[in-house]
Image: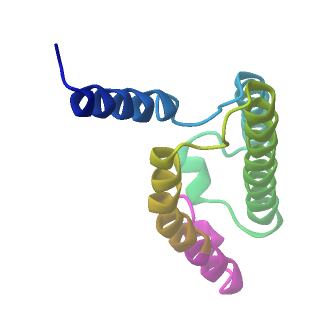
């Protein structure tokens, strides 16, 4: 028969595994809506004549700015949709928004997202959005 310390250790291990079983409270509906929004943005991009990489190299002026605004808005809306969906799902499930592993993953991604935002802003300020697709 295992001693009480071993049983306690096993309980703590099991509890830790159960608490971290879910990375996050991901909302399937929010992911679906984000995908649909991306398809709409792809359709608009195609209608603006920027469906192929070769066509994107020739973009300039108002079309390029419209595409940058379109995809920037798509990004902001999809992030907001997914965050709201995750918060709602977590509340309905009675779970924390993110387990410790999920929090670490988000923190690890923040640096790359920040650098991408700074590069995009720099290209926008210097009116070199034609390079955005190569970045």
Q: Residue at x 77, y 27 (%)?
A: 36
Residue 69, quarter of the rendered image: bottom right
Of residues 69 and 36, which is closer to you in this image?
36
Q: Residue at x 29, y 27 (%)?
A: 10
State the residue lying farthest toward the bottom.
Answer: 126
In magenta stretch: residue 132: yes
Q: Is residue 81 left or right of residue 116?
A: right
State the residue lying farthest toward the top.
Answer: 1
User: In the rendered image, is residue 134 in sight?
Assistant: no
Of residues 15 and 122, which is closer to you in this image?
15
Q: Residue at x 56, y 58 (%)?
A: 57
Find residue 40 and report its horizontal and vertical position in percent: 80, 33
Of residues 2 and 26, which is closer to you in this image?
2
Residue 88, quarter of the rendered image: top right
In magenta stretch: residue 23: no
Quadrant for the N terminus, please. top left
Task: Please say if 131 is above or below 76.
Answer: below
**Which span of residues is magenta-colored?**
118-134
Q: Is residue 82 left or right of residue 66?
A: left
Model colouring? rainbow
Task: Please say if 127 is above or below 129.
Answer: below
Find residue 23 and report its horizontal and vertical position in percent: 51, 36
């Amino acid at each position: 028969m295992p001693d009480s310390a071993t049983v306690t250790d096993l309980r703590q291990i099991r509890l830790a595994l159960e608490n971290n079983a879910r990375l996050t409270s991901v909302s399937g509906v929010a992911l679906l809506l984000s995908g649909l929004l991306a398809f709409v943005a792809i359709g608009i991009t195609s209608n603006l004549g920027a469906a192929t990489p070769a066509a994107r190299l020739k973009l300039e002026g108002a079309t390029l700015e419209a595409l940058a605004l379109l995809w920037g808005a798509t990004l902001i809306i999809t992030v907001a949709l997914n965050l709201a969906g995750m918060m709602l799902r977590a509340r309905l499930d009675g779970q924390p928004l993110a387990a410790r592993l999920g929090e670490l993953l988000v923190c690890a991604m923040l640096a790359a997202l920040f650098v991408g935002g700074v590069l995009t802003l720099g290209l926008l300020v210097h009116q070199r959005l034609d390079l955005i697709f190569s970045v």
